[in-house]
Every structure is written in structure tokens, then in C-alpha cells.
Image (cartoon, rainbow, N blue to C red):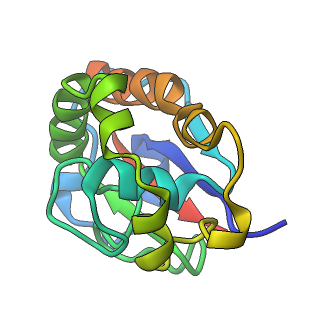
């Protein structure tokens, strides 16, 4: 099956479960119903495509890997993303046209960087479509976070 990733809105109710969570991670807007965005094994390839790196980065689109406080009480690989980081992610993601992402798509570079899910033996027809299939859901998720001034939890399991 392999590792998958998901994003979950970080509401006040969720925040209350983490007493040591920094004040800046508490949502400040209207309380939404919880919402989420799930990724299959393409999560690391998508991170690479959006940021150009396999590891953590300060790039605004780098929220899926090594970003935010570690929240091991939820899952071994779980991090909190602040509402401000979600706002910056939303603004930057909105600027990314699929044609720009297509120009950045380099299966060999992903393989060389050790990106999870990419290997020279796994190259397949339609890889770009597979990696970018969740971008509309990711854009909608980020838009909802901004609308409700929410942060997010990134869980990789």
C-alpha cells in the first residue's frame, strides 16, 4: 500500500486537544465543519513538483514535508500548519498554472532525489496526470482554510 498523506482543517475543537500548540495556530475566524484533502502515494512527488526539492523547504508550497511543529500525539508524521502559512500556500498555489507545473515535471530528477513513489523502474504513462490529480482538491482545501482562517494538520501514514 505505501505511505499516503492527508490534510485536515485545524478547528478550535482540534486545537484544544493540543495544549502546547502555539497560540498562532488557533483559527481566528468562523468555525467550519471539518474538511480534508487526501493524497495517495503521489504526495511526495507533488511536493517535489511544487517546490523543486524532496526535503523540507521554506517555499510557501512546501507544507507537505517537514513543516510546522511535530504533532506525534496524533501520528508519528503529523505537523501543524498555521493559518498564515495556509494563506501563503493558497496565494502561491493559485499562481501555479498546470503548464508551469508540466514544465517542472522531471521523472529523472525525482528519481535521483529519492522522492517517494518515483523510481526509474516505476515510470509510467500518465505520471504527470497522476501526480497532479489532487491539485483541484488541494486548491479547494486551501481556499476553505483561508475562508475560515484555519490552519491544517498534515498527516503522513
Give x and y (percent) for residue 140: 44, 21
> Which residue: 38% across, 58% down?
48
Q: Is residue 46 above or below residue 58?
A: above
- Is 7 displayed left or right of 95 in the figure? right
Give x and y (percent) for residue 44: 50, 61
Give x and y (percent) for residue 154: 47, 57
Front residue (pair 42, 150)? 42
Front residue (pair 44, 152)? 44
> Which residue: 51% across, 47% down?
7
Quarter of the image where one finds residue 22: bottom left
- Is 85 displayed left or right of 73 in the figure? left
Give x and y (percent) for residue 39: 62, 46
Residue 4 visible (yes or no): yes
- Is 122 displayed left or right of 30 in the figure? right
How many numbered discs?
Answer: 0
Q: Tell me the quarter of the image containing the C terminus.
A: bottom right
> Which residue: 47% across, 30% down?
135
Q: Is residue 106 above or below residue 54?
A: above
Residue 15 visible (yes or no): no
Front residue (pair 122, 55)? 122
Quarter of the image where one finds residue 63: bottom left
Q: Tell me the quarter of the image containing the N terminus.
A: bottom right
> Which residue: 41% across, 54% down?
106
Q: Is residue 13 above or below residue 66?
A: above
Amino acid at each position: 500500500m505505501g505511505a499516503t498523506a492527508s490534510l485536515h482543517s485545524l478547528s478550535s475543537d482540534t486545537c484544544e486537544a493540543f495544549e502546547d500548540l502555539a497560540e498562532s495556530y488557533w483559527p481566528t475566524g468562523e468555525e467550519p465543519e471539518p474538511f480534508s484533502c487526501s493524497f495517495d502515494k503521489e504526495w511526495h512527488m507533488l511536493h517535489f513538483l511544487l517546490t523543486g526539492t524532496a526535503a523540507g523547504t521554506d517555499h510557501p508550497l512546501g507544507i507537505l514535508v517537514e513543516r510546522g511543529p511535530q504533532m506525534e500525539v496524533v501520528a508519528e508524521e503529523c505537523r501543524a500548519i498555521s493559518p498564515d502559512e495556509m494563506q501563503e500556500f493558497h496565494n502561491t498555489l493559485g499562481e501555479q498554472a498546470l503548464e508551469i507545473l508540466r514544465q517542472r515535471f522531471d521523472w529523472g530528477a525525482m528519481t535521483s532525489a529519492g522522492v517517494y513513489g518515483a523510481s526509474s523502474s516505476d515510470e509510467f504513462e500518465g505520471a504527470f496526470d497522476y501526480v497532479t490529480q489532487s491539485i483541484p482538491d488541494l486548491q479547494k482545501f486551501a481556499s476553505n482554510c483561508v475562508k475560515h482562517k484555519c490552519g491544517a494538520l498534515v498527516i503522513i501514514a
